[in-house]
Image: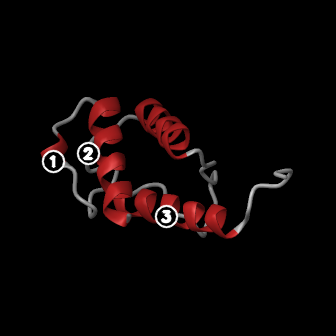
Amino acid sequence: MSDNVADTIFDIIAKEANIDRGKITLESTLKDLEIQSLDAVQILFEIEDRFKVTMPDRDPDFDTESVKGLVDTVQKLLAAQAATPPSGNG
């Protein structure tokens, strides 16, 4: 499951920033990858859309500057979602 999250995020970053997916590692930061802030915003939108999550904005508990941070954040959000059943069903 966690590999899928990372794979998907790598794909999104490569597509939105128009960079070679092979250049992206978990250790990369968006700065390392020379991603402009506008592209970074678009990447966050795509991640939110794909995973149906809301990325925290400037939350010190979440690192959205690095690829690993993005993956960790999505995994945390998905885990929180899984633990909280959607309200209003039934």
Type of amino acid at the residue the image marks with label 1: Lys
| Residue for point 76% across, 55% down | 86
Picture disc at residue 23: 1
Residue 26 lies, in percent from the top left, at 28, 62
Residue designated by label 2: 33
7, above or below 79, in the image: above
Eye-nearest disc, 1 or 2:
1
Q: CA distance from mark 1 to mark 3?
A: 22 Å
Q: For the residue labelled by badge 1, is the local secondary structure a helix, a strand or a loop?
A: helix
27 relative position to 55: left or right: left
Q: For the residue labelled by badge 2, is the local secondary structure a helix, a strand or a loop?
A: loop
71 relative position to 28: left or right: right
Q: What is the crowding at mark 2: few (fewer than 14 residues within 10 Å), some, or many (at least 20)?
A: some
Q: CA distance from mark 1 to mark 2?
A: 8 Å
Q: For the residue labelled by badge 3, is the local secondary structure a helix, a strand or a loop?
A: helix
Residue 74 lies, in percent from the top left, at 50, 58
68 relative position to 33: left or right: right
First in sequence: mark 3 or mark 2? Answer: 2
Type of amino acid at the residue the image marks with label 3: Gln
Type of amino acid at the residue the image marks with label 2: Leu
45, above or below 65, in the image: above
Q: Are marks 1 and 2 in contact (CB under 8 Å)?
A: yes
